[in-house]
Image (cartoon, helix red, strand yellow):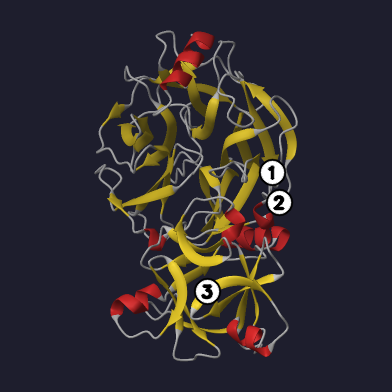
Amino acid sequence: MDATGPHPSRRRILGMAAALPIAGTGALALGAGTARAATDAAYVMCYFTESPDMLAANYGLHLAVSTDGLEWTPLNQNNPVATPTAGSGGLRDPFVLRKQDGTFVVLATDLLGTDWSYVSQYIHVWDSTDLRTFTGYRRMKLHDMNTHSWAPEAYWDASRGRYGVIYSAVNSSGHNVIMVNHTSDFVTASSPQVFFDPGYDVIDGDLAVGVNGVNYLYFKKNSTLVGARSTSLDPGSFTEFSTAVSHGGTEAPTLVRSLTSGSTWYLWGDTWSPNGVFYAWRSSSLAAGTWTALNQRTYTQPLNSKHCGIHPITMAEYGNLLAKWGTPAWNRLKSYNYPDRYVRHADFVGRIDAYAFDPYADSQWKLVPGLADSSGVSFQSVNYPTRYLRHHDYALRLDESDGTSTFTADATFHRTAGLADASWASFRSYNNPTRYIRHYDYALRIDPVSTATERQDATFRVGY
């Protein structure tokens, strides 16, 4: 959720109304407290979408998949796969949990858009056997207080034989705490209890349950991500212990355990603004509570994704989701040496700009067979489909075809192994074969490439 940090006025409004968010949007609890398939080998991410000018604002349930938890493929063309029909009619902060019977439950905040004054004692709930169909849509009431129920997350509490649902609400002292209810069916819930209240504002709680006998709770504190831990799941038992991490106004912590190295954990965080830029950290010991920031070359969030939840799935489920929803019909190209920037057109000029931006479709491309040579590739604009990226006087721009062989040759490139990293890609000009697409002062052009810097300038990741 986005209601703290630089927005103290929102706290005052909600405090008067209630008298705030937890992004349990995505705990990945791979310990004894969470059911998982024995063959888990991939991940699913759930999220909603926003962009700086809100052109991408969509408050339905979105899904993406990944085999490593770092590079993501949006499903259904990055459109929602389910949309709430009750309450506000929209969701934020979705969360996926595999239940003890192997099926899934999806929870989400009942909130459409950014109307922070909207108060709901309910959360959205769906059931799913496979994350391809969503049934039994309902809202579950959590309390009768005059405050919200933001960013719900669920976990299996073996000692109680029930699921815990944690969420954010304002307590009687007027600050944000993490509450908990217990449920056996996600239809009705027990009375609420305060789960975690260190005496100051905390939101966006995310749990990893039963990791070597310890439970870890990460949350947002003063625009940083901080961890607490407990050997039980009893309300009030968690104590803060970790080193805070942040990248600007960071919220929505999401813990992800590597499926290939059990000691490796990732911590995702979201920026509070509509920009919704994700950052990630890595740790080789969750118990140590220290994190190292990852280079953005190593991960790519789904386009316009906000406040995600991540959960492991089997490779069969991964394949079935791709078969059901398909991969995007477009790609984005990330710069190798400026991995926060993507290839786009602006005023029909090719360049790389820092994500996120609007119109976001300026960065979406269809890589079609080369106009002059089908063994090559041409870059067709998604939002200007009659235009292609071509070079003119060595500078790249977005032009409509004039039907000449010169245009088709200018708009054709041969994809090669990345000049700076063979797992990435570089693009050699068809009619100027000693030149490659590269950026210079963030503008795109074709140039001869010889130095290490030039090779990095000419290397891109083709993804989504």
Sequence-first tag of 2 and 3: 2
Asked if the residues shown at circle 1 and circle 2 are in contact, with their CB atoms under 8 angstroms apart, the answer is yes
Report the mark closest to the observer, 3 or 1: 3
Name the residue nearer the viewer: 207 or 378: 378
Asked if the residues shown at circle 3 and circle 1 are in contact, with their CB atoms under 8 angstroms apart, the answer is no
Indicate left or right for 143 with 249 as reference: right
Q: Few, some or many C-alpha atoms within 10 Å of disc 3 (few <14, some 14-19, many ≥20)?
A: many
Q: Where residue 7 appears, x then y in whole percent?
A: 43, 25
Mark 2 secondary-structure assignment:
loop
| Residue 176, visible in the rendered structure | yes
Distance (Cα) linking label 3 and label 1: 47 Å
The residue sitting at 37% across, 35% down in the picture is 218
Residue type at tag 1: Ser
Indicate left or right for 101 with 42 as reference: right
Residue type at tag 3: Leu
Q: Where residue 168 appears, x then y in whole percent?
A: 48, 24
Q: Is residue 42 above or below residue 115?
A: below
Indicate left or right for 353 with 226 as reference: right
Q: Which mark is residue 128?
A: 1
Report the mark closest to the observer, 2 or 3: 3
Q: Few, some or many C-alpha atoms within 10 Å of disc 2 (few <14, some 14-19, many ≥20)?
A: some
Residue type at tag 2: Arg
Mark 3 secondary-structure assignment:
strand
Residue highlighted by disc 2:
132
Mark 1 secondary-structure assignment:
strand
Residue highlighted by disc 3:
396
The residue sitting at 29% across, 27% down in the picture is 239
Q: Is residue 347 above or below residue 109?
A: below
Q: Is residue 314 above or below residue 54?
A: below
Name the residue nearer the viewer: 364 or 126: 364
Q: Where residue 100 appears, x then y in whole percent?
A: 58, 40
